[in-house]
Image: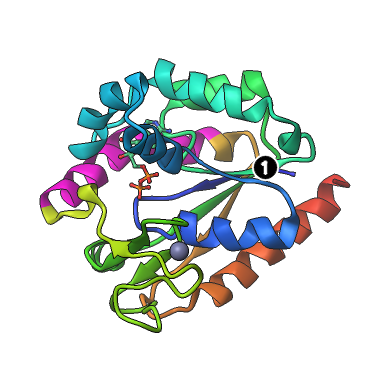
Amino acid sequence: MKIVILGPPGAGKGTYASRLTKILGIPHISTGDMVRDEIRRQTDLGRKIKEYSDRGALVPDEIIIRLLAERLKREDCKRGFILDGFPRTIGQAEALDKISGVDLVINLNVPDDVIIARLSNRLICSKCGAIYNALTLKPKKEGICDRCGGKLYRREDDRPEVIQERLKVYRRQTEPLIEYYAKRGLLRNVSCNDIMTPPEVMVEKIMKVIREVEREKNL
Ligand code: ADP
Ligand code: ZN
């Protein structure tokens, strides 16, 4: 199944997608992770896109679409994929329709106060990319990843000023996708109103929707 997870920054896209990939056996593709990987490896592309990412702006469509199109050509995407952080503009959604199409769009509804509390407490593993939260999803040992022992860090764009900018960018450029996909009959809403709701509960809600759509469409 070709799944898109849509939602504001901090909605939990990456946290849920990294769990769904194991249940469904299809790859989790995060354009945010791809962007951070290019930056870390200091590739030519990485140098070009760092300035956008650091200030919470979107990387230009042509660059991100090229990156994603390359990724979707790989063998592991044949049976489907979970997209996290793409598309983020109407232009990207139109490109995706051309490249591969979409079966289901999960729209995560999360209030602003939850988003801000999540992002300002988010911790990421520098080795394996696992996501933690200093308030709600603490590692067993402070500052250390449960899974791989890697050091946890805060993302450059999780500073308060940049969070506000990312929310603005989301409202302006990404939110119109809700209507884009609703019109095509592909959108399903899943809400999370309480910051303490554990990821497992959300993943269960999302899996219910996925199974329903599988049945409806005979996928
Ligand atoms: P968030 O937690 O805000 O959802 P991501 O990890 O998905 O953040 O993305 C981090 C940054 O990478 C974005 O702020 C943006 O600069 C860049 N980026 C990721 N995906 C895209 C995309 N589809 N289009 C443009 N820029 C992107
Ligand atoms: Zn780790």
On the rendered structure, is 16 left or right of 24?
Answer: left
Q: Is residue 88 above or below residue 155?
A: above
User: Could you say where residue 104 lies in the image, as x and y percent from the top left?
Assistant: 66, 44
User: Could you say where residue 145 lies in the image, as x and y percent from the top left?
Assistant: 41, 70
Q: Any magenta on residue 124? A: no
Residue position for label 1: 81
Rendered residue at 79%/40% (across/down): 79
For the image shown, how many numbered marks are present on the structure? 1
Q: Is residue 47 above or below residue 21?
A: above
Q: Ligand 1 lies in which image quarter?
A: top left
Q: Is residue 93 above or below residue 179?
A: above
Residue reaching furthest bottom?
140
Secondary structure found at label 1? strand
Rendered residue at 80%/52% (across/down): 214
Rendered residue at 40%/65% (across/down): 150
Is residue 19 visible in the rendered image? The answer is: yes
Residue reaching furthest right?
218
Is residue 111 visible in the rendered image? The answer is: no
- Quarter of the N terminus within the rendering: top right
- When asked about the image quadrant of residue 130, the answer is bottom left
User: Could you say where residue 159 lies in the image, as x and y percent from the top left?
Assistant: 16, 54
Q: What colour scheme has been applied to the protein in the rendered image?
A: rainbow
Q: Which region is colored magenta?
A: 161-180
Residue reaching furthest front?
149
On the rendered structure, is 113 left or right of 99?
Answer: left
Magenta stretch secondary structure, dominant: helix
Rendered residue at 77%/59% (across/down): 212
On the rendered structure, is 45 left or right of 116?
Answer: right
Q: Amino acid at mark 1?
A: Phe
User: Could you say where residue 106 lies in the image, as x and y percent from the top left?
Assistant: 57, 51
In front: 212, or 73? 73
Q: Any magenta on residue 175? A: yes
